[in-house]
Image (tube, grey):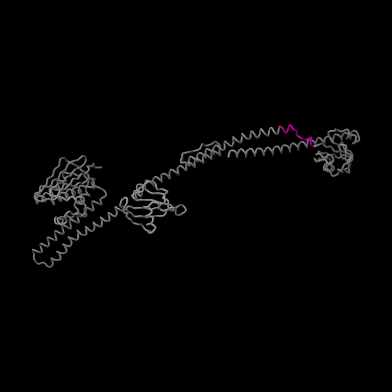
Amino acid sequence: MSRRIITTFLASIIVAMFFLTSAFLIISNLQKLELVSEKLETNNEVLINYMEATGIDPIVLLRSANESFRMTLIDERGNVIFDSSGKETFENHLLRKEIVDAFSYGTGSDVRVSESLGIQMVYFATLLPDGRFIRSSMESGSLDLGNQFTKYMAVAFVLVIILAYFLAQRISNYLIEPINEMTFATERIANGEYTRRVSIRRDAELGKLGMNFNNMAERLENTFLENQEKQNRLEAILKSMNSGVFAYDNQDHIIMINPFCKELFGIFGDVIGKNIYDIKELRELIFMLETEKDAVEVRIEKPIRKDIRIKSAEIYGERVTKVGTVVVLEDITDLKKLEKMRSQFVANVSHELKTPLTSIKGFSETLKFVKDDETRNKFLDIINDESERLTRLINDILTLSTIEQTKTAKHEEIDVAKETEQVYHLLLPKAESKNITLNLTQKEPILLYGDRDNYKQLILNLVDNAIKYTKESGEVRIQLDKQENNLRLVIEDTGVGIPEKHISRIFERFYRVDKARDRAMGGTGLGLAIVKHIVLSMGGTIDVVSEIGVGTRFTILIPIRSLE
């Protein structure tokens, strides 16, 4: 580009100099012609004045005139009477321009090639009183500026070209430098260096160009940072999602996949840009989506057994044209488990409710036909027992439901010794009725903050169960102490014990180790489930150790938190 600017500038200078020189020569030539014409006119006036003053014959006067001029005497008919060139035969000059003008205006001039001499001449004619014409002429060659002038012009031309070259180079550098700087800046920006800027020039145009470039670079940087921020937020969202997401374009190339999706199918490495059909696990999903319009639920076995729901949606660009497809994989494994647990819970509740209701209905209908008072009272006692059992079951279901649905935990001050002692005195008569020793041991005062009613329910269920499954003359021990920053609650009995295969399931709803025995003892199958939920709601843990025929020990650890 610099060479083009220099070449264009020099060409412009040369053309300008050519026209200027031509104009100078033309103007100089015209001035010279005017001066010569004035000189010829003066010569004619001098000769005419001399002739009028002396009365000398014009021919004699013209022969003695200045030899630097060619003198001609022409009569009124245009015939040449005398010519100082020595030529004797001439054409008629009546129609020559200078003669025509002199005839009309008294004087006339012309520049042309002489037909008699064959060279360019300057003519000036003056009309004499007697109707004849006296004409002076000179060769136009005498107007040549000469070799010296040509040399000067050539030297000046060369000097102007050299100066113009250096000036053009300087101008080119001045113009190209900011362009080169902007070119370098654009290359750096294209490589990710968005903070690159150019210097602002003093010139209005280049300064404005630099300012516009920097403004554009700043807007580009802000746009990039905004897009980067959006991309980071999107990546953070995708990474934190518990659903798999991947997308592919119209050419079936993967354009996005989140970590959960890769973990779900055991995909390792970078798969961005790969064809969706080259990845076996994803290819099978695409085939399923092509045959189903709505969401599809499938179960995968590897690397982890999962139930997933698949949905897809098309991605549209700015011109409302499809640019790809996004697929969302929702992990519904836990949802399926919850649905199964809910179904089992409903079935268990229905079964548990059905048994006492059937007994109540059956015996109440039978009472219509019983007239014996003893039998009637026996049936009424059975109906009363089943009603109480039904009431306990409903109360336990409501308690469990309340604990599960409570979002905001209470922060009441709980005097552990006081509340535990209340439960102790409440259940002591029941223990004494079976000749069971009930012991309460507390080493130091302990305060908790939480739900007081839940804590009492926790102690009540565990101690009641211990008394229920301990044989006569047995022992139930309640121990309270601190372990680091936790309340340790130990409830130990000398009861029948729990088989090891059942320990992992005893906290499930309606799970019974011995169904017949549990029902006979009035159990609902929800006591330990309630205990577990209360312990979890208080941020604690529960551990069970049991041995058949020896007894069972429940150990609960609950963090001691301050009131916030």
Magenta span of residues: 140-151
Q: Is residue 532 magenta?
A: no
Decide if residue 246 is on the left or right side of residue 509.
right
Asked whether residue 131 is in view, the answer is no
Decide if residue 261 is on the left or right side of residue 349.
right
Residue 293 occupies quadrant:
bottom left
Q: Residue furthest bottom?
A: 369
Residue 522 occupies quadrant:
bottom left
Question: Number of callouts in the render?
Answer: 0
Residue 275: x, y in percent? 42, 51
Q: Say which residue appears at 14% left-offset and 61% top-offset.
A: 383
Residue 36: x, y in percent? 79, 36
Decide if residue 407 is on the left or right side of residue 479.
right
Q: Main secondary structure of the magenta part?
A: helix
Closest to the observer, 120 or 323: 323
Closest to the observer, 346 or 96: 346
Q: Say which residue appears at 22% left-offset and 59% top-offset.
A: 350
Residue 50 occupies quadrant:
top right
Residue 264: x, y in percent? 34, 50
Closest to the observer, 548 or 66: 548
Residue 164: x, y in percent? 63, 35
**The C terminus is located in which quarter?**
top left
Decide if residue 485 is on the left or right side of residue 161.
left
Asked whether residue 511 is in view, the answer is yes
**The N terminus is located in which quarter?**
top right
Q: Is residue 142 magenta?
A: yes
